[in-house]
Image (cartoon, rainbow, N blue to C red):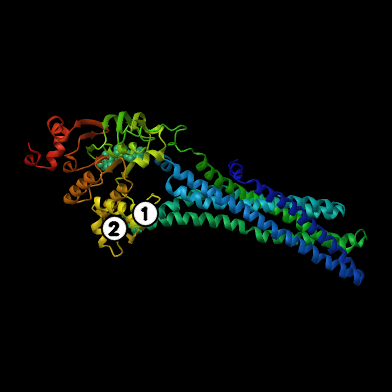
Amino acid sequence: MSLLRLYKRFRWYDWVFFAFICGLTVLQVFCSMKNVDYMQGLTEAIVTLDQDAIWWNGGMMVAVAAGQFGCQVVIAILASSMTASLATRLREEVYERVSAYGLSEIDRFSTASLITRTSNDIENVQMSTLLVFRMLFSAPVTAIWAICKIQATSMELTWVAIVAVLIIVLALSAMMFFVLPKFKISQKIIDRLNQVTREGISGVRVVRAYNAEQYQNDKFEKANDDLMNLNLYTSRIMQLMNPLMTIVLDGASLGIYAVGAHLMKSLAIDYATIVAFSSLCIQIIFAFMMLLMLFVMMPRAMVCARRVDEVLRLKPSIVDPEEEVLPDPAIQGEIVFDHVSFAYEGGAHPVIADVNFAAKQGQTIAFIGETGSGKTSLVNLVARLYDVTEGAVLVDGVNVKDMKQATLRKKIGFVPQKGNLFAGTVRENIGFGLDEMDEDTMRKAAETACASEFIEKMPEGYESHIAAGGTNVSGGQRQRLCIARACAIDPEIFVFDDSFSALDFKTDKAVRENLAKAYPNATKLIVAQRVGTIMDADLILVLSEGKVVGQGTHRELLATCETYRDIALSQLSKEELGL
Ligand code: DGT
Ligand code: MG
């Protein structure tokens, strides 16, 4: 079923190609049957030493063989182009679908599995579809045509053919019984291998630091060995196919000549008929083998198809509304949390419970609280990376669910807690996602983030290369580049999720002052660990286990909120706090 659903991606012209393939298949089988006739004629001619007939039949055999070859070439070209374009379309669609997924859907499949599904699984679907197009039609046509032809010859010889086919069917069914269950689990093992490989490579620093190479290697070897054993098992069984086929074909020929010789003695049949019969018999056995091979290959293709189809059918949970509510252009940078609660999918407890606050344009709102108190989860809701479970998040007076995601995210300069950079130049990273960025915007962004000084010291300045994930710059530099990236879009709202933690106190202060100066009208949401970073905020929310336990300015909180006072006193002296 899943396979058929994937086949819906074939375009109309693919079906025209398919019709051609069917037509050519019939033509090809016709040629091969004609070949047998001419072979029979040739044998007769050789027996009777009829020179003209030898030339005529020999020539015709070459001609029909050429016709058959031509058909096969065209079928192969059509079928490969159909399946290759199907695979391309599927990959494109899967990639687009995965890009549209929210974080919760990606968690559900796991990254490694999504990669196997986009690459290996689609490839399997492609290869087996190719096989289907080339065999599914031609094998039965050949078999039926050949059977009709041999029936007229002799019952005794027909029995030899039937026995040979029965042996093939039985042997292949036994083979299927052993390999099919293995094919079904192979994709899971490939998923695991991918996961271990990814983990080992991306976590290489930690692996080194903990001398865990052997531990990781063992994990890899286990997955690798599992895959090897499975492949060995299936390919050993499949390899039995070749000798088996030779034995059956030779046995059938032998049987036909033996029975034929017997029949010839009683003059019921001539030698040429036996030659033709043996050739037809081989074609029938071959056709059955191909059909059964298809049955062996198809279950694996179906497993792969189901896995691809699963990805395509899972609708992203975060989608654009049918009708967008446009915010009033006069309102900018306003954020309201109206009784917001949020729980992760599968999580037992809400990680955000009944949070209320409102931010006006240009204000700075800060969030502080122990680790795991839900700060990241809270600011993720502003950019609608997850949807709230209860209540509503309003940006510029409109519920974020009623806004197109692109409209919403254009307003927000988001600096995630785990800053990620992409392979490319510094310029490309700062202008990430922008169609174009002029020199001034880039420099202003870099200067605001205090990044210009170290960028200019790099050998090629703004054209210097950044490695994937930003692994060739320091943690603080990475944070500053992420801040610059947010500045470059000149947003209405900034979200800084713990973005100042890797900066020294001086730079931390400088960046905040630059931001206030360069983007005075932008609303700033700041998650911070250091009280010093947020002391001047217009509103501070103190979070504990997802609940707001204090809300107000620094002064107010010092007076009223015990949790805040504890945090503040653990970092600054009484004098510094003015107590
Ligand atoms: P931090 O960054 O260490 O200071 O901590 P917060 O305050 O940013 O905490 P947050 O929002 O990352 O996590 C709050 C709780 O939610 C915590 O108990 C772990 C849980 N949590 C975080 N991310 C996920 C997730 O992706 N899935 C699930 N199921 N739970 C998560
Ligand atoms: Mg966090």
Residue in the image at 76% along x and 53% along y: 26
Q: Position of residue 43 (x, y in %)?
A: 86, 66
Label disc, if present, on residue 567 of the rendered structure = none
Of 346 and 575, the residue lying toward us: 575
The three-letter code of the residue at mark 2 reads Val
Residue placed under numbered mark 1 in the picture? 422
- Residue at (13%, 41%) from the top-left corner? 570
Of 90 and 300, nearer the camera is: 90
Mark 2, residues whose alpha carbon is within 10 Å: few (<14), some, or many (≥20)?
A: some
Name the residue nearer the viewer: 25 or 459: 459
Ligand 2 placement by image quarter? top left
Q: Which residue in the structure is indicated by mark 2? A: 473
Q: Where is the N terminus found, in terms of image quarters?
A: top right
Count every numbered label the image shows and give the total.
2
Is residue 166 visible in this depiction of the protein? no
Mark 2 within 8 Å of ligand 2, using the beta carbon? no
Residue 486 appears at what percent x and percent y?
31, 47
Residue at (39, 56) in percent of width and height: 218
**How would you rate the neighbour count of disc 1 (Cα within 10 Å): few for under 14, some for 14-19, many for 20 or more?**
some
Quadrant holding the C terminus: top left
* Percent position of residue 258, x then y: 83, 62
Q: Earlier in the sequence, mark 2 or mark 1?
A: 1
Q: Secondary structure at mark 1?
A: loop
Residue 25, placed above or below residue 555: below
- The disc labelled 1 sits on which kind of residue? Phe
Alpha-carbon span between mark 2 and mark 1: 12 Å
